[in-house]
Amino acid sequence: MSEWFDETLHDAYHQGFQVSEVLFESKTEHQHLIIFESGSFGRVMALDGIIQTTERDEFIYHEMLAHTPLFAHGNAKNVLIIGGGDGGLLREVLKHSEVEHVVQVEIDQAVIDMCVKYLPNHSAGAYDNPRAKIVIGDGIDFVTQCDRQFDVILSDSTDPIGPGEVLFTSPFYQGIQRCLKPGGIFAAQNGVAFMQPDEVSTTHQRLSPLFADTAFYAAAVPTYIGGVMTFAWASNSGTAREQDLATLTSRFVDSGIKTRYYNPALHIGAFALPQYLVEIL
Ligand code: AG3
């Protein structure tokens, strides 16, 4: 009889993965962590029973969370990542040669260590890159206390349950505002809108009083089940989001960055939302 991993995120609806081997499972200082080999999506990592990343579809999420704000900005030298312990986002951010320094604030050292070991293609050496500095700590403490500002801030958190909950609150977003340079952009994972519509409306209500521009963009990531994953976007520049196709295309081509999902046309199209979301904003 084979073993299955059933995700526990949604009520009365779930996805299951056939597990061919459990590579690591433990309660860390902050959460339950499991990494297993699946029959369908390669290696899979889950925190507190919720799928975080799989080898097969992680590129969609990490490329969209990194490249959409970075190409819209065009000259981000300092980037802050909150969360993202598996290293996939750091890997994508470091592909931008204009990025001089990345600070990553991850609460759980065990997630970094175990992902370097069991999901090596996620970080792909990014943690050894001299442009990257890792801080072990809570993202909300960092953004409320830090004395420097960033061009782009990315929140690669869990859902607003457990340690990730504070990363969806007004005090956190106020911290983001104080850490963002003029013209800066904040982007954050914001759940699967069809399944978690309150997250979209709540985040919108909390971000829009603080920033000149608040928006959402979307991409379908198969293992974040139930429809498209949405990303929140906030900027103290009213125009950062409105880069046209020609500008984005020249930045993308000049960068030489090879992607499997992101491209400039998709970047622009990702901000077009279905009517049921437009109406709750
Ligand atoms: N963090 C976002 C996982 C969100 C899962 N939520 C959901 N399916 N609604 C992913 C971490 C990858 N670096």
Image (spheres, rainbow, N blue to C red):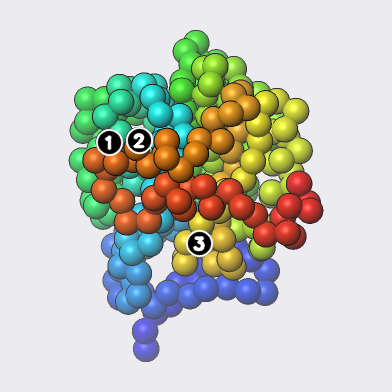
**Residue designated by label 3:** 220
The answer to whether 97 is drawn above or below residue 121 in the figure is above
Q: Secondary structure at mark 3?
A: loop
Q: Secondary structure at mark 1?
A: helix
Q: Residue beneath label 1, please? A: 254
Q: Which residue is mark 2?
A: 251
Residue 79 lies, in percent from the top left, at 41, 26
Residue 60: image location, x then y, percent: 41, 56
Which residue occupies the foreground of this view, 28 or 206?
206
Relative side of 155 to 121, left or right: right
The answer to which image quadrant residue 74 occupies is top left
Crowd band around label 2 with a 10 angstrom C-alpha radius: few (<14), some (14–19), many (20+) = some
Q: Residue at x 58, y 48 (%)?
A: 271
From this viewpoint, which residue is outermost toward the top? 147
Depth check, mark 3 against mark 2: the one in front is 2
Mark closest to the chain's N terminus, 3 or 2: 3
